Image (cartoon, grey):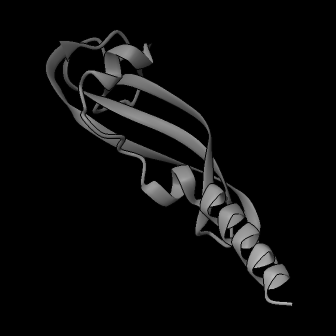
């Protein structure tokens, strides 16, 4: 049985300090986050289908999108787990390797 689907997740990149929130109307703590959606097979082999970087209010979770270039300057490595980014590629390489190996041993 093949189990597949899509999911989403949010990872915090860091705090921005106190800022005025247009929705709440007062000074609130803000943070940088990345939100993303990914496709998966067996919940292990994944591939990111979309991602957004946001400056978000810590209370009401509203904010504005920031450019990916600015957000990438904030972190050295991607906060998205390795198997959610490249898991599907690893699965394809493993299946291709098995096919090549089995065809060579005949």
Who is closer to the viewer here, 68 or 20? 68
The quadrant holding residue 45 is bottom right
The quadrant holding residue 20 is top left
The quadrant of the picture occupied by the C terminus is bottom right
The quadrant holding residue 2 is bottom right
The vertical placement of 19 against 50, above or below, is above
Residue 58: image location, x then y, percent: 28, 32
Residue 42: image location, x then y, percent: 68, 73
Q: Could one spot residue 104 in this view of the protein?
A: yes
| Residue occupying the point 33% across, 24% down | 72
The quadrant of the picture occupied by the N terminus is bottom right
| Residue occupying the point 36% across, 40% down | 78
| Residue occupying the point 50% across, 27% down | 52
Q: Is residue 18 left or right of residue 21?
A: left
| Residue occupying the point 71% across, 62% down | 92
Q: Is residue 28 left or right of residue 104?
A: left
Who is closer to the viewer here, 18 or 88? 88
The vertical placement of 17 against 19, above or below, is below
Q: Is residue 65 left or right of residue 56?
A: right
Residue 60: image location, x then y, percent: 37, 30
Residue 3: image location, x then y, percent: 76, 73
Who is closer to the viewer here, 43 or 16? 43
Q: How many marks?
A: 0
The vertical placement of 100 against 47, above or below, is below
Q: Could one spot residue 1 in this view of the protein?
A: no
């Amino acid at each position: 049985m093949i189990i597949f689907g899509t999911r989403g997740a949010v990872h915090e990149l860091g705090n921005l300090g106190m800022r005025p929130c247009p929705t709440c109307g007062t000074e609130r703590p803000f943070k940088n986050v990345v939100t993303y959606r990914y496709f998966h097979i067996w919940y292990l082999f994944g591939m990111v289908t979309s991602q957004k970087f946001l400056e978000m209010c810590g209370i009401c979770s509203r904010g504005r999108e920031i450019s990916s270039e600015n957000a990438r300057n904030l972190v050295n490595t991607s906060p998205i787990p390795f198997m959610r980014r490249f898991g599907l590629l690893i699965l394809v390489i493993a299946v291709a390797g098995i096919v090549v190996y089995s065809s060579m041993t005949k």
